[in-house]
Amino acid sequence: MRLAGVVALIAVVGLGTVGVVSAQTPAPTVTITASESSVAISATSPLASGPTRFDVVKSGQGELDISIGALRPGVTLDQFTAALRQSPDDAIDLVHIDAGATLSAAEQSRAVTTSLRPNSTYVVLNATGENPANWEIASFTVGGQSNGASAPRADATIRIADLRFSGASTLPRRGIVRFQHTGWAPHFAFAIPLRRGAGTRAVGRALRANSERRLGRLVDFESGIEAQSLVTRGADDYNELRFPRRGRYVLVCFFEGHNTQGMYRFVRVR
């Protein structure tokens, strides 16, 4: 009986130890507050590397376009800023765009969790508006120490690679959708609800033809949301999304005409 009791005690202690080790540490939250002409970060540098939740909060009206990226080795903040003012397309080559959030006029906030790279300088770019000369930039640094946090559990996963979306065919109306980017080019995912009676073949033909007029009869652009902001290779984002309604959607990347090359995927939101 004593031996059985000792064995039982060891089992209980062992299970408790496993529970402690496997317990997940939630990602720390950094708040980004922005309007059309401003951007501010709540964090104090340096941050620890690892999964970090960015809560993007709108302080004004209208749309908001925020990108979060690590400068590539050897690139300074001044070099990136100068390149951005001259040519945003060239500036993309100077940074790993790891995450971001594009808020529609109806959205007041959006959260995304991404893993910060150790020993890096990050830029938070407010790319709202048409003139890059007016885009606001904030920055923070990440040290070599890990925060020990875990990424949140995803309700669905979409993979982005080489002009294709793959993965889940059903997404939650309100939940966390993980986007993993392993492709060679920058991509984003705009989620647009299909109108009643619209066929997927007709939508696909209109997307390949890049016919805005035909698409307007088949999909509801005004109710679309940017489920994944523009990111580059290696991005692994957990986006906390609220779709406007249930039903059939099409995920599209319009960056540099990728839709004409078949970069779209039909999904159902439930």
Image (spheres, rainbow, N blue to C red):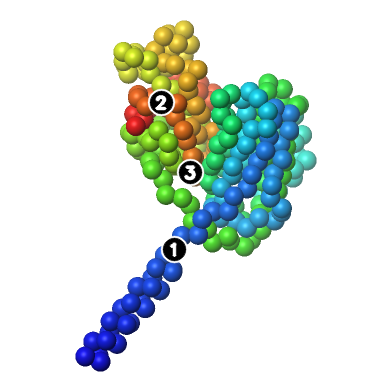
Image-based side of 211 in relation to 56, left or right: left
Q: Position of residue 203 (x, y in %)?
A: 37, 16
Q: Secondary structure at mark 1?
A: loop
Q: Earlier in the sequence, mark 2 or mark 3?
A: 3
Instruction: Please tell me how crowded label 2 is: few (under 14), some (14-19), or many (20+) other residues with Cα within 10 Å.
Output: some
Q: Earlier in the sequence, mark 2 or mark 1?
A: 1
Locate the N terminus by quadrant. Answer: bottom left
Hey, what amino acid is under mark 1?
Ala
Eye-nearest disc, 2 or 3? 2
Q: Secondary structure at mark 2?
A: loop
Please identify the residue farthest to the left as the structure is shown.
1
Give the label on residue 245, or none: 2
Hey, what amino acid is under mark 2?
Arg
Image-based side of 237 in relation to 56, left or right: left
Instruction: Please tell me how crowded label 1 is: few (under 14), some (14-19), or many (20+) other residues with Cα within 10 Å.
Output: few
Give the label on residue 23, or none: 1
Please identify the residue farthest to the bottom as the structure is shown.
2
Residue depicted at 63% across the width and 23% down the height: 62
Q: Position of residue 89 (x, y in %)?
A: 64, 29
The alpha-carbon separation of the residues under discs 2 and 3 comes to 20 Å
Q: Examine the image and state in which quarter residue 262 appears.
A: top left
Give the label on residue 238, or none: 3
